[in-house]
Amino acid sequence: MNDHYKTLLNRLSRFEQNVTTRLTRTESKLVRGFEELGIATDTNNDWLTVDNDARIVYVDTIGRSLMVLLAEMVRLGATHFGDNYEVVHKGETIAIVELRKII
């Protein structure tokens, strides 16, 4: 692969990280804002189930942040870091997330 393509891939990777960080921050601000308005954004403790072998996560709500989702996935046994997991809500795949460690 020549240097031009390596540079382009590096820029795209940084752009992806930047967009992900901005979306996460926006999502967190929205959740906090709703909570300040008195809108309950929390749910029961069993809102998420992980099928680690199939790499599927079943959620009962879509009112949780991405960071909470990833942290709960790990807490409940998701172990395939770097792999994609389907997020299923009411029988439909609503997202695909890459399992990453939360720092």
Image (spheres, grey):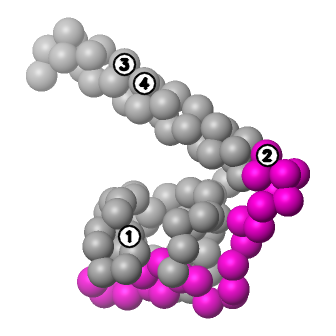
- In the displayed image of the protein, which residue is found farthest to the left? 1
Q: Which of marks 3 and 2 is nearer the N terminus?
A: 3
In the image, 6 versus 101, the foreground residue is 101
The answer for how far apart the CA atoms under marks 3 and 4 are is 6 Å
Q: Where is residue 17 in the image (x, y as percent from the top left)?
A: 48, 34
- In the displayed image of the protein, which residue is found farthest to the top? 4
Which residue type does callout 2 highlight? Gly
**Residue 40 in magenta stretch:** yes
The answer for how far apart the CA atoms under marks 4 and 2 are is 27 Å
Q: Give the range drawn in magenta.
A: 32-59
User: Circle 2 — which element?
Assistant: helix
On the picture, is 92 further left or further right than 103? left
Q: Residue 11 carries which label?
A: 3
User: Circle 1 — which element?
Assistant: strand
Residue at x-position 73% and y-position 42%: 29
Q: Which mark is residue 15?
A: 4
From the image, state whether disc 2 or disc 1 is nearer to you: 2
When asked about the image quadrant of residue 4, the answer is top left
The tally of labels here is 4
Whether residues under marks 2 and 1 lie with C-beta atoms below 8 angstroms apart, the answer is no
Q: Earlier in the sequence, mark 1 or mark 3?
A: 3
Q: Earlier in the sequence, mark 1 or mark 4?
A: 4
Classify mark 4: residues with Cα within 10 Å, few (<14), some (14-19) or many (20+).
Answer: few
Which residue type does callout 1 highlight? Val
Q: Is residue 101 in view from this perspective?
A: no
Classify mark 3: residues with Cα within 10 Å, few (<14), some (14-19) or many (20+).
Answer: few
Image quadrant in which the N terminus is located: top left
Q: Which of marks 4 and 2 is nearer the N terminus?
A: 4
Please give the residue where the numbered disc 2 appears in the rendered image: 33
Q: Where is residue 6 in the image (x, y as percent from the top left)?
A: 24, 20
